[in-house]
Amino acid sequence: MPNNIRHETRHETRIVCIRHGQSTFNAAHKLGGGDPGLLDARLTELGQAQAQAARDRLRAIPFELVVVSPLTRAIQTAAILFGDHPSQPHVLVEVLHRECQESSCDVGRAASEIAAEFPHLDVGHLPEVWWHAEPGCEVGGYPVEPRPLFDARVAAFRAWLRARPERTIAVVGHGTFFYHLTGTFLENCGTIELDLDAAPAAA
């Protein structure tokens, strides 16, 4: 008897992590002097140029989904990278992979402010205050996220990615978060492919 059982081939998910371009915080921090107090830092002109260069490197990848942090520097980078991408991927704002909150630049803005500045993005699923803002968590004048909560976010984001139906995903985010996710610290607009089947990066 002929074997009529159909065997489906498992398709691997390709996930490309992309760090944002240089921010005003990055530029000021290089000069020394401690935290410059730049809340939700934006891209510099260099950061915009870095994103333009990275855009050309990513155009050949048929992304289905772009997952972007709600911090402004990531949103600006994603807009440059994928605003005219040939595959026209869906863009989703996700808070799980926002930066490890340890500096002024990692403190976000209200969802309503983001919606007003970037009306092309859907942020209706975000709480108005989506960053860590628990009373008593301030260090040096800015709220700092406890390490256990950050580690839990990294693990939750891996699980979130694994559950996504898309097969080609771009993740636009941040240096420290990506270091704990992949084990590699990316330069501004650097990229790395994430293997979800590999062991999680060491803390």
Image (cartoon, rainbow, N blue to C red):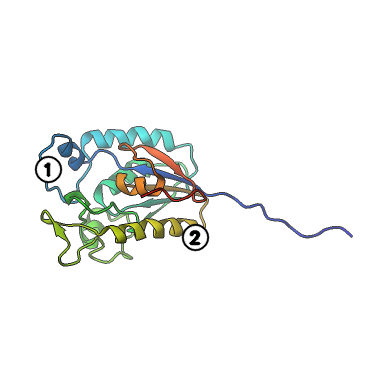
The image quadrant where one finds the N terminus is: bottom right
Q: Nearer the viewer, residue 29 or 118?
A: 29
> In this rendering, is residue 11 above or below 48?
below
Q: Residue at x 33, y 65 (%)?
A: 125
Q: Residue at x 30, y 46 (%)?
A: 176
* Residue 94 seen from this side: no
Q: Nearer the viewer, residue 2 or 139?
A: 139
Of circles 2 and 1, the one toward us is 1
Using a 10 Å C-alpha cutoff, classify the residue at mark 1 as few (fewer than 14 neighbours), some (14 to 19) or many (20 or more).
Answer: few
Q: Nearer the viewer, residue 49 or 94?
A: 94
Report the side of 117 relative to 123 (left or right): left
Question: Tag 1 or tag 2, which sits nearer the N-term?
Answer: 1
Q: Amino acid at mark 1?
A: Gly
Q: Amino acid at mark 2?
A: Ala
Q: Which residue is mark 1?
A: 34
Q: Which residue is mark 2?
A: 163
Q: Which mark is residue 175?
A: none
In the rendering, at what x and y percent does residue 168 appear? 50, 48
Q: Secondary structure at mark 1?
A: loop
